[in-house]
Image (cartoon, helix red, strand yellow):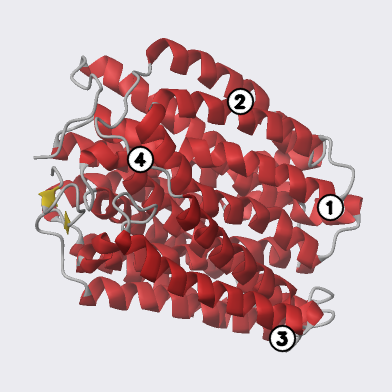
Amino acid sequence: MTAPDTATTSGRQPRKRLVLAICCTAVLMANLDTTALNVALPSIGRELHASVSSAQWAVAAYTVVLACLLMLFGSIADRIGRRTVFQAGLVVFGTGSLLCSLAPSPGWLVAFRMVQAVGGAMLNPVAMSIIINVFPRPAERARAVGAWSGTTGISMAAGPVIGGALVDAIGWRAIFWINVPIALCAFVLTTRFVPQSRAAVARRLDPVGQLLVIGLLGPLVFAIIEGPHRGWGSPVTIGCLLLSLVCVVGLLSYEPRRTDPLIEVRAFASPPFAGAVVIAICAYIAMGGFLFLNTYFLQGVRNDRPLVAGLELLPMAAAMLVAGPLWGRSTAERGDRLTLTVGGALTTFAAVLLTFTFDGGNQVLLLFGYAVFGLGIGYLNTPITTIVTSGLPRSEAGVAASIATTSRQIGQSLGVAIIGSILAATPGALDSVAAFHTPARICWSVLTGAALTALLVARVAPARSASPRTTSRRRPKTTAPQ
């Protein structure tokens, strides 16, 4: 049996719900910032004279750093205390937000977004691991994870509208100001109500594995974003791609030999676990690319005001909000395969529909496509989290939650990088609807391919009937709690 966490998780239900609300609020803050920023990108570009590539980096710098550090801070939280790391994340994220609001140039904005990402890396996986340990029973955990997933939907719904309203009324810097009081309030409430917890058996840190993860993701996204400008055959681009490949090989050969690896490579031997990670990456390639593409379509090509563009994205976001809690309950009762299949099918259908109709002038059809797309992503979100977090023992909740969130961030980073590169490779793509049509249709085809891949993996990977097993040398064949 796996040693239990050193935490008190049997408190009264109202206290559990309060802890859930605090964790969701912190994650809402981080996600709200990202969705609001997407709506503000054209305004940032005009004020700071930023190119499409600079706008890509304003988004991708955050998601890449987040993806690189999530597993590190998940392990640290399991080791030194989840509440401690969560509080540190609130301080760093709030400070980074304040610095972003003062950025005088695109370069400084990207740098301060990286500071934000360090704080975000302390918040996202740790919030999930706190929830997992506060809700140990399978049914209530699935409902709690559904509520947490619904937080993403809330941020998607509120982010574009709040961001658009703030940009119209005050300016893009205001989207960073609002994080400071939220972070402060969450810090105080965490100190008062969130229990401290940590793994009974602390994992060793893995600096080599951490460097290999950074060497994999950083150069890969850099090559995709800068490829259209530096040339796909340039020494820098090819060198970055080769470095990423070398780091992949290094991870696959080095991590299985460690007792406490940064990435539990052995967990990927479970088809449900590996399938969930692949689905997460594909789904968030689609979502990250969707937000970037449609931000420039609505504001840069159609010349809609930021608030109007935010309202136009509301059907997609509202559908995500509805889908999270609904399918959290369904997953607990019926399993994962149906949820994943429905989510993949809806996302693929919406992407195909929008590929051929996005600039046809039919506003109702456009908004319908947005809503179906959001519904599909919302259906995929909850089972991804429950499968991945069930693939490791509860004592390693931080690591498990980090893998789930890292998969999403990798997908979102790749989505922004790929879609932005397609637009950047076409001179004048944002000058008119006619010029935008061809590169945008290519972008929609890429998003369709990502959604279709998620659907196919959902059908091929076995459904989760019991928790996947890990074969750690210190914990041989430990079955995760259901």
Q: Nearer the viewer, mark 4 or mark 1?
A: 4
Q: Along the line of sight, which residue is nearer the eye, 9 or 325?
A: 9
Which residue type does callout 3 highlight? Trp
Secondary structure type for disc 2: helix
For residue 361, say whether it is visible: no
Q: Which circle's residue, 1 or 2, is located before the other in the chain? A: 2
Which residue type does callout 2 highlight? Val
Q: Which circle's residue, 3 or 2, is located before the other in the chain? A: 2
Quarter of the image holding residue 388?
A: bottom left
Q: Along the line of sight, which residue is nearer the eye, 424 or 274?
A: 274
Residue 480, given in percent of the width and then of the height, sits at: 15, 46
Return the residue at label 1.
106
Return the residue at label 2.
91
The answer to whether 273 appears left or right of 434 in the picture is left
Q: Could you tell me which residue is drawn at 43 percent across and 49 percent down?
A: 206
Q: Could you tell me which residue is drawn at 37 percent across and 32 percent down?
A: 79
Q: CA distance from mark 2 to mark 4?
A: 19 Å
Q: CA distance from mark 4 to mark 1?
A: 33 Å
Secondary structure type for disc 1: helix
Q: Could you tell me which residue is drawn at 61 percent across and 25 percent down?
A: 91
Q: Along the line of sight, which residue is nearer the eye, 73 or 341?
A: 73
Bin the neighbour count of mark 4 within 10 Å (Cα to Cα): few under 14, some 14-19, many 20 and up.
many
Q: CA distance from mark 4 to mark 3?
A: 38 Å
Return the residue at label 3.
232
- Evaluate if marks 1 and 2 touch, with contact meaning CB atoms under 8 Å apart: no
